[in-house]
Amino acid sequence: MDSVRAFDGEPRVDAAELMKFVVAIFERCGMSQADAVLLADSLVDADLGGTHSHGVLRVPEYVEKLTVKGVDPTAKPEVVGQGPSFVIVDGRNSMGQIGAALAMQEVIGKAAQTGLAAGAIRGSNHCGAMAYFARMALPHDMIGIATTNALPTMAPWGGAERLLGINPLAISIPAGQRAPMVYDAAFSGSSHGKIRIYEQRGMRLPAGWALDREGLPTTDPKAALDGLLAPIGGFKGAGLAMIMGVLSSMLSGASYGTELGSIEDGPTPGADGHFVAAVHIASFEDVERFKSRVDAAIKQIHDCQLAPGFDRVYAPGELEAIRRAEYRTQGIPLNRVTLADLRKTAERLGIGGSEYPRTRRGRLQR
C-alpha cells in the first residue's frame, strides 16, 4: 500500500490551494503570516511527499494546541546561547516548526564557517516531519540532521509500559544528477499519525507495527492506538529511540520521556526539545566529487538484483521525490475523514466555504 499511486480513488486537492487554506486557518489562530506560512508549508510539504501522518491531518490538533491547549501562537523563538559551532534556541512555547527552523538556519550559517555546527532547542512543541528541517541544508551543499523527542508511546525492549518516544531521526545528503538522499523515520514500526490514517481507511495494520496494552502484537488500529508502538529491530530500535530522546532534550534542558506528558493527558505545552546539525561538505571534500560518489551509490542500488516481488529498488527519499513531482501536478490525495476534519475546523474559526480548496469533485462539501 506504500506505492506512489496507492490511493488514487481518494479526492485530490491542489497543493497551492491547500496551502492558502491552511495558512488562513493558522492566521485565525493568532499566528503572524510568516509563522502561519512556515507551519502550513511543513504540513503540506509532508503531504506532497506522501507522509500524510505528518500532513494536514494534523491541522485540527494544531488548532487545538494554538487556541485552547496552551501553545502561544504569537511566541517568537530566541537564540539564548551560542558559540562558533553551536546554538541554543528557546522556542518560548511556539509551535516546534518555528523554533526548529530558526535553529537550522543558525547552524547552516555557522557550519559554513566552521565545517559543522549543531543546535539544541527547548521550550518547544510538536514540530512535524523532521525531514523538513534536514532538507533545509541541501541548497547550501550541506548534510542536514534533525531529531526530536516525542510523547512516550513505546516501551523499552522487554517492557510493556509507555516510557519511550519514537523520537525520529532525519538526515539529508546532497546528490549530483540524482535526487538527494533523504531519510526520515522514527525508531518504531510506525507512528500514531500513520496508524490513524489506517484507522480512517478501515485497514488492518502491517504486522510488527504495534502492540496492544498487554504488550502482545496486534494489527487492529484501535488496539494499537490504545496500546504500544513496537520498536524497529527489537532492542536496537528501542535503544536508538532513547539516545535520540537524550540528544533532543538534555543538551538544551528540554523535557525527556515521561516529563513531556502522556498520550492520555496530552503534552505539556512548551516542554518539547529538538536537535539539529549541518555538515559543510566543502570543508571535508570536493563538493562535486562527493555528489558524484553519492550518485554512483544510488545507481549501484538501482542496478541491484531484485528480490522476488519487487520491481525496483529506491534510495532513501526517492519515493517521496516521485510523489512530490506527481502530486504537484495532479493534486494531493487526501482521505475524506481528513477533508471533513479540515472543513469542520475551518467552520469553527469562521472561514467560509468559498475559501475551501477544490477537490476533483468540487469544493469540500458539508
Image (spheres, helix red, strand yellow):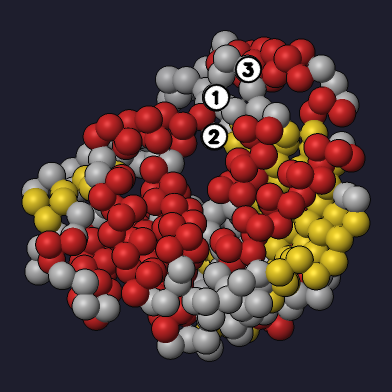
The percent position of residue 333, horizontal first and vertical second, equals 27, 46
Sequence-earlier tag: 2 or 1: 1
Residue shown at 24% from the left, 34% from the top: 330
**9 lies above or below 203:** above
- Mark 2 and mark 1 residues within 8 Å of each other at the beta carbon: yes
In this picture, residue 135 sits left or right of residue 44: right
Q: Secondary structure at mark 3?
A: loop
Q: Classify mark 2: residues with Cα within 10 Å, few (<14), some (14-19) or many (20+).
A: some
Tell me the kind of residue under disc 1.
Ala
Which residue is identified by label 2?
Answer: 317
The numbered mark at residue 176 is 3
The numbered mark at residue 307 is none
Q: Could you tell me which quadrant the C terminus lies in?
A: bottom left
The percent position of residue 234, horizontal first and vertical second, equals 69, 55
Q: Classify mark 3: residues with Cα within 10 Å, few (<14), some (14-19) or many (20+).
A: some
Which residue is identified by label 1?
Answer: 179
Q: Could you tell me which quadrant the N terminus lies in?
A: top left
- Report the mark closest to the observer, 2 or 3: 3
Residue shown at 18% from the left, 60% from the top: 356
Q: Nearer the viewer, residue 19 or 339?
A: 19
**252 lies above or below 255:** above
Q: Is residue 325 visible?
A: yes
Q: Is residue 245 visible?
A: no
Residue 152 falls in which quadrant of the image? bottom right
Q: Classify mark 1: residues with Cα within 10 Å, few (<14), some (14-19) or many (20+).
A: some
Q: Tell me the distance, in whole angstroms, between the alpha carbons under discs 2 and 3.
A: 15 Å
Q: Tell me the distance, in whole angstroms, between the alpha carbons under discs 2 and 1.
A: 8 Å
Sequence-earlier tag: 2 or 3: 3
The percent position of residue 317, horizontal first and vertical second, equals 54, 34
